[in-house]
Image (spheres, rainbow, N blue to C red):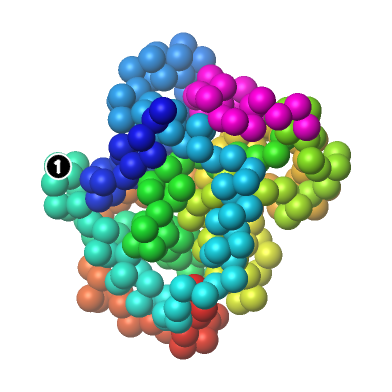
Amino acid sequence: MVNPTAVAHDGLTIEDEWSGFVAGRYREGKSQAEFRNYDAAVVPTVAEFYKINHQLQTLDFVLEKEKEYLALKKGRMSVWEAAEFLNTLVDDSDPDTDLTQIEHLMQTSEAIRKDGHPRWMVLTGFIHDLGKVLCLYGEPQWAVVGDAFPVGCAYSGKVVFPEYFAANPDSKVAEYQTECGIYEPNCGLGNVHMSWGHDAYIGHVVRDYLPESALYMLRYHSFYAWHQQGAYQHLTSEHDREMLSWVKLFNPYDLYSKGAAKPNVKELKPYYEDLIAEFFPDKLDW
């Protein structure tokens, strides 16, 4: 039996290693040979992370977490308070970065802003990882980060490390292992239960305040099997396919902004306070 807390005790070390793995795995223009070599050389902690994630992200687990968190009963915080709350996750032992979580968020949003995208998209970049406050509610990292995938239907071989799904109890449930499983063909992603994590959570928290294109970016930015590998088309609606371009537009900012210059939080804070106030009330339910 895998210890579900085995990779959940080192601050954001696993999350940072996962981010680096994802950025390499989905680099544009990468050859198939490079892809195989990269997977073979993946850091063991990331492989162990996915072994646990794929074993324990069952349909029952996801339904339990949706019931617990989508009721938004954890408290009331402003967006900036949530970002400062997330800052307490900084891992001082990580030798690869000295950035705070707010600085990471600003790297993404400032790259979007630099390219002249709408203010709602800049804000989306700033908040896209705020769902990681789940870690501060006591959730292990395998239930917070990682590539997202549908539960309750057959697993795609395009999900990272698909071999690890063999240990998931749902893999033995015949109803869940047909192509569509518990869903109707082309039912739309809004009707599909995704593996639980920060995407679903932050997308739900801000659902009433941002345009639909932003919500797609938030809800599906870790659903790489769909937006980078073309998997699960049989579950998507025509509207999902129309919105895919927004998710793909956001993806490079999510993956590749960490190499940008360190932002000056004090100098930029007034801009973001005004931006947040433009779209959100003083406090949100979390």
> Is residue 218 or residue 132 the one in the foreground?
132
> Is residue 187 or residue 63 the one in the foreground?
63
Residue drawn at the location 52% of the way across and 75% of the way down: 73
Numbered range of the magenta stretch? 155-175
Q: Position of residue 277 (x, y in %)?
A: 47, 85
> Is residue 84 or residue 255 the one in the foreground?
84
Q: Disc 1 on helix, strand or loop? A: loop
Residue 267 against residue 48 in the figure, above or below: below
Residue drawn at the location 61% of the way across and 76% of the way down: 209
Residue 119 is a magenta residue: no
Pointer 1 local density, CA inside 10 Å: few below 14, some 14–19, many at least 20: few
Q: Position of residue 186 (x, y in %)?
A: 84, 42
Residue 177 against residue 282 in the figure, above or below: above
**Is residue 225 among what the camera can see?**
yes
Quadrant placement of the N terminus: top left
Residue drawn at the location 64% of the way across and 56% of the way down: 216
Q: Which residue is mark 1?
A: 95
Residue drawn at the location 79% of the way across and 41% of the way down: 182
